[in-house]
Amino acid sequence: MADTATVKEVKKSSLTFGKKEKALITDPLNDTNPITVQVLGICSALAVTTGVKNSLVMAVAVVFVCLFANTITSLLRKRIPKQVRMIVQLVIIATLVTVVELTLKAINFESYRQLSVFIGLIITNCIVMGRLEAFAMGNDPYRSALDGLGNGIGYGLILIAVAIPRELLGKGSLMDFKIIGNTSEFLVNTTEVSWLGWYANNNLMVLVPSAMIVIGILIWIHRAWNPKLVDVS
Amino acid sequence: MHSTKYIYTFVFIMTALVALLLASMYTGLKPIHDKNEALYNKRAILSAVSDQLGKDIKSMSDADVQAVFDSQITQIAVDSRGNEVSSAQMAEECEGAVKPEEIDMSKEKKKDDSEKILPVYVFENGDEKYYIISVIGNGLWDEIWGNVALKSDMSTIAGIDFDHAAETPGLGAEIKDNKGWKKQYIGKSFYDATGNYTSVVAMKGGVKDPSYQIDGLTGATITANGVNDMMASGYKLYESFLKKQKKS
């Protein structure tokens, strides 16, 4: 499955934006999506998707790391000694992740407190390193940047798609805006609407197992909608 | 194939560059980080008296928080024998803490009770005075901590705020998120009618004595027990100080 993501090096390195370049961005959103097709980066997708706000911050962080890790690796690809390339890639990723962490701590301390461990864990996110090995080491910086951008967004979209049902059904809110619940703080107060009295926010949705179920359902929907993804065998 | 010398040079230069970049970024952003951390802490302290402030802490801007903190809060550092601690002694024993708000509670937690130095925040709102004490303990997975505001009788809770490092969302994390549950603490006393120390206890299976008991948290027995232990031992550390204040 993973080798579908490997793209042969494009010989000419002009800065045109043609079909191939467009595919670099749009493929990871659909046909080679890191989470639903390649099943990479599941760990953080399970952990941070309890709220849309956290997922959004995480998505931005991963897009940033993917984009710049790909670009920097690609710029250095002819100078990186093959024997230590993994370590070099890891240093690049770790540096960028630390930059993200320090910046987030300065601009949004609340999110930093909620996400701290998982921001650090972007280092181990298979998507980032996977793209460096599979793409950036063999392609020019421009196309590598597009590829990083596409994969980061592909990951972020799924995070948000998982977070929306989890936050809505689990806490009754979206982006911390309270929508449905059994107290007067919520927009729809279930205790006041007679036919909604049975509804209660489902705590299971906030816990990690529900993320597994939601991702499973997303993969199912994705494959039903995109027949290219169904294994021929 | 690159030579071994080239590999060493490459790795060395790369490491040096990265170290320089990160170190300068860390140093450059440190003042902002410290400020954010201090404000976060101040918000947590003020959350304990949010009912008295008359507005939602979350909707207050950083400047508002700072202003309330500066104008209405007096901070004191005390030891467990009830004596005030001088700022010189505090700086020496709490790694250079200049103000009591800078005391690192998780480090104090590890010290012997007799060596602990603890912050007290006196919140003045018109004629009323509230004493806010900081407590710390263990939840199910990691540390939990909180600030408890006491009325001027030094034993009745006026407001409370908890936080945690890693409790389960929806279960243990309710100690922070469930406002309705925290509200139960208001008006409870650390002593029963005859003056015995009872602490304030979250009870599993229903409240028997409403003067010091509140409903437990469903599905979070161990976290709730942690909160109970934290409240009992945390208040005890401040007891002699609070008694002295009550007399004077």
Image (tube, grey):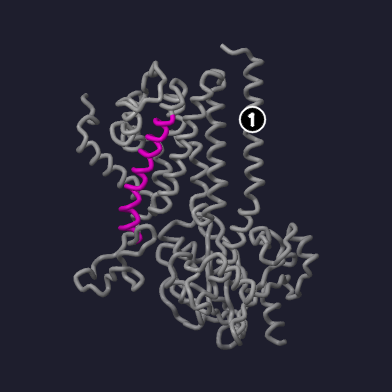
Residue at the location (52% across, 60% down)? B164
The answer to whether residue A161 is magenta is: yes
User: Magenta: predominant secondary structure element?
Assistant: helix
The quarter in which the C terminus of chain B is drawn is bottom right
Percent across and percent down for residue B200 are 54, 76
Give left or right: position of B68 versus A205.
right
The answer to whether residue A95 is magenta is: no
Give left or right: position of A191 versus A6.
left
Q: Nearer the viewer, residue B151 or B168?
A: B151
Label 1, on which residue?
B15
Percent across and percent down for residue A22 are 32, 30
Crowding at mark 1 (Cα within 10 Å: few <14, some 14-19, many 20+):
some
Residue at the location (64% across, 30% down)? B15
Residue at the location (25% across, 65% down)? A199
Q: Mark 1 lies on which chain?
A: B
Residue at the location (40% across, 66% down)? B218
Magenta residue span: A145-171
Q: In this view, does B228 lie above or below B242?
A: above
Q: Nearer the viewer, residue B58 or A172?
A: B58
Secondary structure under tag 1 reads: helix
Q: In this view, does B145 lie above or below B247?
A: above
Q: Which of A102 and B111 is in front in this view?
A: A102
Give left or right: position of B173 versus B101.
left
Percent across and percent down for residue A101 are 54, 45
Identify the amino acid type marked 1: Thr
Residue A203 location, quadrant: bottom left
